[in-house]
Amino acid sequence: MTQPTPLDELDRRILNALQTDASQTNAELAELVHVSPPTCLRRVKQLTDAGVIERQVAIVDPGKVGARLTAIVEITLDVQAAERMEAFEKLAAAEEAVLQCYRVAPGPDFVLVVQVVDMPAYHALAHRLFATHANVRNVKAYFSTFRSKFDTRIAV
């Protein structure tokens, strides 16, 4: 498991501000966190170099781009040998509709968060990932009927 990176109060202010809006300029961010622009830029670079900031992205509304169906899928493999687990992880990671893939315990071996256009698209994905994959023993899918919360912020 990765060791936490030591963060001071300025790092925390920067991370909180960027998690709220990463599109602001360095000058705007520096003003918001009450430091000079060069200091702010240097700190953001240090946080990025340390891997604390993995990447900056735009969060897209799935419904506005036609991906209206969210599924949370539990997968249990028939054989849990390391190479078989890794093979399934690679298969899931290569699938564009899989937004998140977690190894979990106890219970199923994996939990996937999947975003697709509709039920036929889910069935096609299920066929590609689960039905044709010989090591998948059990699949249990839950389909979202309403999203009451979605956030990407991590409390720092």
Image (tube, rainbow, N blue to C red):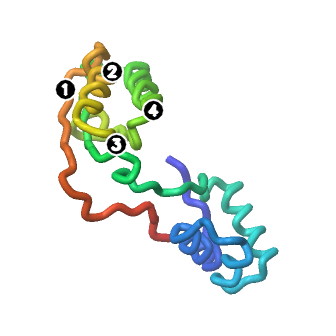
The vertical placement of 20 against 129, above or below, is below
Residue at x 21%, y 50% (from the top left corner): 144
Going by the image, does 109 lie left or right of 83?
left
Question: Real-space Cα distance between discs 3 and 1?
Answer: 20 Å
Q: Which residue position is annotated with label 4?
A: 93
The secondary structure type at the circle numbered 1 is strand
Percent of width and height locating residue 51: 63, 53
Q: Quadrant of residue 15?
A: bottom right
Q: Few, some or many C-alpha atoms within 10 Å of disc 2 (few <14, some 14-19, many ≥20)?
A: some
Q: Which residue position is annotated with label 1?
A: 138
Question: Real-space Cα distance between discs 2 and 1?
Answer: 15 Å
Q: Which amino acid, by three-letter code, is at mark 1?
A: Asn
Going by the image, does 92 lie left or right of 55?
left
CB of mark 4 within 8 Å of CB of mark 2? no
Query: Who comes first in sequence, dot 4 or dot 2?
Result: 4
Q: Which amino acid, by three-letter code, is at mark 2?
A: Arg
Q: Which residue position is annotated with label 2?
A: 128
Q: Few, some or many C-alpha atoms within 10 Å of disc 1 (few <14, some 14-19, many ≥20)?
A: some
Percent of width and height locating residue 137: 21, 21
Between label 3 and label 1, give the one nearer the viewer: 3
The vertical placement of 21 against 129, above or below, is below
Between label 2 and label 1, give the one nearer the viewer: 2
Q: Nearer the viewer, residue 110 or 69?
A: 69
Query: Who comes first in sequence, dot 3 or dot 1?
Result: 3
CB of mark 2 within 8 Å of CB of mark 1? no
Query: Who comes first in sequence, dot 4 or dot 1?
Result: 4
Percent of width and height locating residue 94: 47, 29
Q: Which residue position is annotated with label 3?
A: 115
Between label 4 and label 3, give the one nearer the viewer: 3
